[in-house]
Amino acid sequence: MDRDKVAEILVEIGILLELKGENPFKTRAYSNAARALETLDEPLQTLIAENRLGQIRGIGDALQKKICELVTSGRLPYYEELKASFPAGLMALLQVPGLGPKKVKVLYEKLGVASMEQLEQVCREGKVALLAGFGEKTQNNILEGIKFRSTTATRHYLFRALALADPILDSLRAHPDVIRCSTAGSVRRCKEVIGDIDFLVSSQKPAEVIDFFTRLPGVTSVNAQGDTKASVILEGGIQADLRVVSDKEFPFALAYFTGSKEHNIVMRQRAIQRGLRLNEYGLFRSSEETRDPQLLVPCATEDDIFRELGLAPIPPELREEIGEFAAAERDEIPRLLEWTDLRGSLHNHSNWSDGRNTLAEIATYMQELGCSYWAITDHSKSSFQANGLQPERLRSQLEEIRRLNQRLEDEGTDFRLLTGSEVDILNEGKLDFENDLLAELEVVVASIHHGFSQNESEMTKRLIRAAENPCVHILGHMTGRLLLEREGYKVDQPAVIDACAATGTWIELNASPLRFDMDWRLWAYAKSKGVKCVINCDAHRVEHAGFLRLGAGIARKAWLTKADVINTLPLPALRQELQRKRSR
Ligand code: DGT
Ligand code: CA
Ligand code: CA
Ligand code: ZN
């Protein structure tokens, strides 16, 4: 078992003990230990093998034993028994905003609440308001929280869907009765959040494929199972639908089930204008609804369908009825960015602020991944909760980066770390570091992390003022939104884009799957103003380099091409571009 999983279990034990009413010192020991594990700078396995776990501050004898047991056997009976002593639904209540273990304990003990439904009921009956320490206001907040949860719980992050869909696609592809298969729906269109996962398969033996699908390892329950379709729930509660069609029907079904609905409507209208009918079964020479194979216009792929309707092929990411038809009619669908065009990320963190890895680890990992460069932009001093750097520490970080780069050069390697900062935009748009320090850095990203409650005009002014600073290359995560969690602060984004156009400032497409900020819908405007995009991982650990792929997917959805994205440039060209604004 790896360290993240161990830390997760320790946190959960702490919460369970709190629910039991154990004393705070004991419960806190577990969350402290979890934090200590998360910031280790050597592998947990090594510490255990060398019997050095006890040397870590905050990990006493009892905890040591439990961690060893988890790592070596992957199990911990103490935890399993503790967990089994509570109803399964109790932990879920902690997801209601504002409900901590203490309150959940009271609700459970006094009112027998052990599920979301029960919680909602006792709130509606007014029983919660009467509990000591709760009151009318808390009761209302809980009801609000439940409502928020129920709308967000039906939507999921794209990356969760992809992580589940990829192995399922692999399994389907390997099945002897599967001819073609693909995801469809919002996952294929690369929406930032999705409702469910849609799979489409062509086969001559649908029953076999459906049976196979419903028994896949990731499937936790089967909602519906028919002759040609099935609907299941996957780990994490995400629903997945499968449809099986004949191989002749596959392109038509794929187009239909990829959607979007709005896009499909226009497709059908175009067919009708040409004396044809388009549906999920085919494209037919007919003036009324049919699925008569005699009337079928044969199409081997989706591209053929588009051609029959007088259109250049439209990539799935663009099928949102936002101008793709006008462009496809004129054969002006751009050649979209590929994720392999990206050469590095210009906004990332190390363990000098709130990241996990050392500079050396980052350099090695990114170089092996095939990147050309990787900027280190740790937080600035005002972000003290993220361990932001004081100017002196930043200057010593620059030294270390220079040493590392020297070593890379001596080894004959082209990869380089770039120096930088994610400098806080303070109130009124002043930056957290002076310009003489910023001017020493190769890459400056400016972002807002505090003061979210300002109104739209104040926020807009803050961002515009940051863009006007000649040292700032990039505005980071424009709205600060966290998908499914919190809306961004209010900003007049077109006004900020105008300011970036006027000052030669780039805008980040933050590729963290929780952010995808600036939103894909705004890039057409930015592009029309000549503002360049930078796709940044905002990596807090080396594995976050994988976000580049997700970010590229969202950039495709935003109609961006290789030429629109700065971090497709090789290092020498990037260096030139980084000088451009400063020498204006
Ligand atoms: P989601 O799952 O909410 O993220 O969004 P989608 O787009 O994946 O929607 P979903 O799963 O309900 O259906 C997949 C596609 O199937 C959808 O994009 C278009 C097509 N589709 C489904 N139902 C209808 C319908 O009633 N009318 C039309 N025109 N298309 C439909
Ligand atoms: Ca779907
Ligand atoms: Ca669906
Ligand atoms: Zn950051």
Image: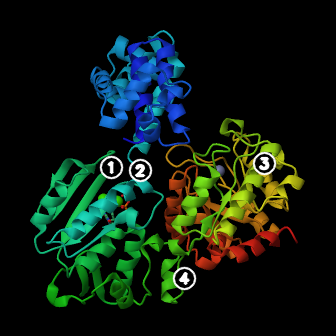
**Residue holding disc 3:** 396
The quadrant of the picture occupied by the N terminus is: top left
Residue 156, disc: 2
Query: What is the crowding at mark 2: few (fewer than 14 residues within 10 Å), some, or many (at least 20)?
Result: many
Q: Earlier in the sequence, mark 1 or mark 2?
A: 2
- Residue 178, horizontal then vertical, whole percent: 18, 72
Q: Specify the amino acid type for callout 1.
A: Ile
Residue at image position (15%, 60%) is 212
Q: Tell me the CA gap for discs 2 and 3.
A: 41 Å
Report how many numbered discs are placed on residues in the image. 4
Secondary structure beneath dot 1 equals: loop
Above/below status of 139 relative to 584: above
Residue contact between numbered discs 2 and 3, judged by CB atoms under 8 Å? no
- Residue reaching furthest front? 50
Along the horizontal axis of the image, is 365 left or right of 444?
A: left
Q: Amino acid at mark 4?
A: Pro
Q: Position of residue 500 (x, y in %)?
A: 76, 65
| Mark closer to the chain start, 2 or 3 | 2
Asked if marks 1 and 2 touch (Cβ < 8 Å), the reply is: yes
Amino acid carrying mark 2 in the image: His
- Residue in front for this viewpoint, 500 or 322: 500
Q: Coloring scheme of the render?
A: rainbow
Closer to the camera, 294 or 253? 253
Q: Where is mark 4, residue-wise?
A: 334
* Kind of residue sitting beneath label 3: Ser
Q: Residue at x 17, y 52 (%)?
A: 224
- The reply to whether residue 530 is in sight is no
